[in-house]
């Protein structure tokens, strides 16, 4: 397969004031596009051309760093656009809410740990909610890594590379993470991925 960049699932200005049109134009059209272009170049003659994106990510990890970085970031960003929606961050669907409470004790505790993971990720990377051994866990990873290469299935991720927030929040990464959790998360998509992960 070759990697392709789908359009954003909403208008560029749909996430304002929490994420600007300018951020989405750069982040989707320039940064994500570059991962797709570089990933396709590196996929050629890699031996992984016929594989699914998830398999390319898992099988290139630790073996083909250039391909891994770009394919990993392609996977992460494909989901990242869907992990947000206009008027997001509201009520959490029952099944995933129950699973979060079972794993963390409360929704607030899970949100706090998720934000803290993003705040404390040194340099570029991601904070995650992932399903591991049937439980929901918080993870953080550097650069293009994700829970797939650590034996877990990502169900929510926040991009904490500076390209994701610097135009809107400058150095205030904690404010960006709080806005992501409170006002952007598409919990219906999280539920969809949770259901698949435990199904
Ligand atoms: Fe990004």
Image: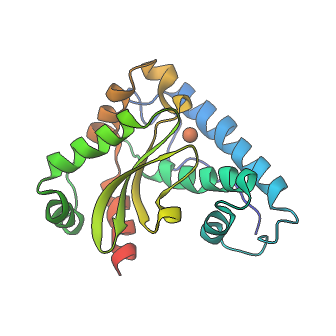
Foreground of the two, 189 or 58: 58
Which residue does the image show at 15% across and 46% down from the upper left? 108
Residue 4 image-quadrant placement: bottom right
Foreground of the two, 119 or 21: 119
Extreme-front residue of the structure? 62
Please, is residue 151 above or below residue 168 in the view? below
* Residue 6: % across, % down: 64, 54
Extreme-right residue of the structure? 45
Q: Quadrant of the C terminus?
A: bottom left
* Residue 102: % across, % down: 15, 65
Residue 152 image-quadrant placement: bottom left
Which residue does the image show at 55% across and 34% down from the upper left? 24
Please, is residue 51 above or below residue 116 in the view? below
Is residue 80 something one can see in this rendering? yes
* Residue 173: % across, % down: 39, 27
Q: In this image, 170 relative to 112: left or right?
A: right
Which residue does the image show at 49% across and 49% down from the upper left? 80
* Residue 138: % across, % down: 32, 53
Q: Quadrant of ligand 1?
A: top right
Foreground of the two, 155 or 151: 151
Please, is residue 155 above or below residue 127 in the view? below
Which residue does the image show at 19% across and 63% down from the upper left? 103
Q: In this image, 113 relative to 145: left or right?
A: left
Extreme-bottom residue of the structure? 199
The colouring scheme, among rainbow, by chain, secondary structure or one colour, is rainbow
Q: In this image, 46 relative to 32: left or right?
A: right
Residue 155 image-quadrant placement: bottom left
């Amino acid at each position: 397969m070759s990697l392709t960049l789908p359009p954003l699932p909403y208008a560029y200005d749909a996430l304002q004031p929490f994420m600007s049109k300018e951020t989405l134009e750069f982040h989707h059209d320039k940064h994500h596009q570059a991962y797709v272009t570089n990933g396709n170049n590196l996929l050629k003659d890699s031996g992984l051309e016929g594989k699914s994106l998830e398999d390319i990510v898992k099988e290139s990890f630790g073996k083909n760093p250039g391909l891994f970085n770009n394919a990993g970031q392609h996977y992460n960003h494909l989901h990242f656009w869907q992990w947000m929606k206009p008027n997001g961050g509201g009520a959490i669907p029952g099944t995933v809410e129950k699973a979060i409470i079972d794993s963390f004790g409360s929704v607030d505790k899970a949100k706090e740990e998720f934000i803290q993971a993003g705040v404390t990720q040194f340099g570029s990377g991601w904070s995650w909610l992932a399903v591991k051994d049937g439980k929901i866990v918080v993870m953080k990873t550097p650069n293009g890594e994700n829970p797939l290469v650590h034996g877990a299935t990502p169900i929510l991720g926040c991009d904490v590379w500076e390209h994701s927030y610097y135009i809107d929040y400058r150095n205030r990464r904690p404010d960006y993470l709080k806005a992501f959790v409170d006002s952007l998360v598409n919990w219906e998509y999280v539920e969809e991925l949770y259901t698949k992960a435990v199904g």
